[in-house]
Amino acid sequence: MKIYLLGSMDAAALSVWQRHLQAEMPEDQVLTSLAPEQKAEVEVAVVANPEPNALLGLPGLRLIQSLWAGVDRLVADPSLPPGVPVCRMVDPQMNVAMAETGQWAVLALHRGFFRYARQQAQACWQPLAQRRADEVRVLVLGWGQMGLALGLRLAAMGYRVSAWRASEEHSGAAEHLGVSVHAGPQALAPALAEVDVLINLLPLTPATRGLLNAPCFAALPQGASVVNLARGAHLVEADLLAALDAGHLSHAVLDVFATEPLPADHPFWQHPAITVLPHAAAQTDPRSAAAVVAANVRALKAGEPLRHVVDVARGY
């Protein structure tokens, strides 16, 4: 089977991915470029945010496997071949990495470590009041693989954790291993009112685009913090700056942005209440992700159900 590997990565990264994928699928041929006569032979495209129209002219394509967890750009491509299943990357190691970043952010906000960093820059020795973990309320937006991994870890650390999912399926509140899970648009505002730290791990869809906005921030209690680890388009940047400058929000940890890399003159870089990460909260690890891809390719060959198929209409 011919497998076409393509996407938004440099030649060195592409070579690393090709090596790991080929090692997992030695019986197949993993290609990073195609001769004209090879295009009809490609049955699987393994992609990392490919450019629009990149998958045109592959008449034998049977599977599009994303290397990234987020597939919003991929499914928004109007040239996406109709009827070809798209699968997103769900890598246990990526879930662990995202949970680690979320834990770090919550702990740093809870214990005032970002404030201590600012005090160090001023040579200021000033211990802060120390709260217990069970006095800190955390709301995780998104209750998929990553949200679940983070929420359960935080609950195990003693935090008061709740979660919200955008889907109205199973709407209302339910308990999941000690985490109160709310569902549906009507449940969001009441959930926001009981939060000290808000963490966004939602998929980007038309319904969630711009969800982190002025009404959302106003619904949070005075002094709450926001952590965005999902997509830059979830956040209305001007609304966040206004809420921070007004003192309603105390801090924001941001890993994703509308424009990446974040421009050097962007106000987020110098804002004292914003911590900027370079889209590094959970990077895909080729060592583990290649095995995930290979498992879906084997399922395709055997006529078995594919894992983590995207509902293109819903966007995830």
Image (cartoon, rainbow, N blue to C red):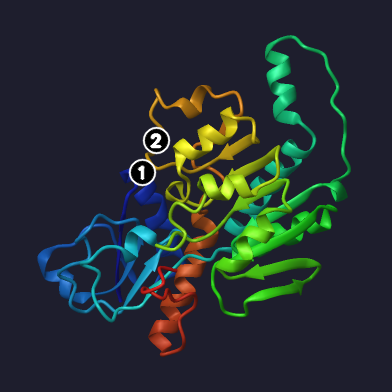
Residue 233: image tag: none
On the image, the x and y values in percent for residue 13 come to 38, 46
Element carrying mark 1 = helix
Q: Give the residue number, with chain letter if any, for mark 2.
A: 261
Q: Closer to us: mark 1 or mark 2?
A: 2
Residue 177 horizontal side relative to residue 2, left or right? right
* Amino acid type indicated by mark 2: Pro
On the image, the x and y values in percent for residue 158 come to 85, 53
Can you say whether 258 is above or below 60 in the image? above
Q: Is residue 143 visible?
A: no
Residue 194 horizontal side relative to residue 96, left or right? right
Residue 208 horizontal side relative to residue 122, left or right? left
Q: Quadrant of the C terminus?
A: bottom left
Can you say whether 50 is above or below 104 in the image? below
Sequence-first tag of 1 and 2: 1
Q: Give the residue number, with chain letter if any, for mark 1.
A: 12
Mark pair 1, 2: CA separation: 19 Å
Can you say whether 14 is above or below 290 in the image? above
Instruction: Say which residue appears at 11% left-offset and 70% top-offset.
Output: 37
Residue 260 picture quarter: top left
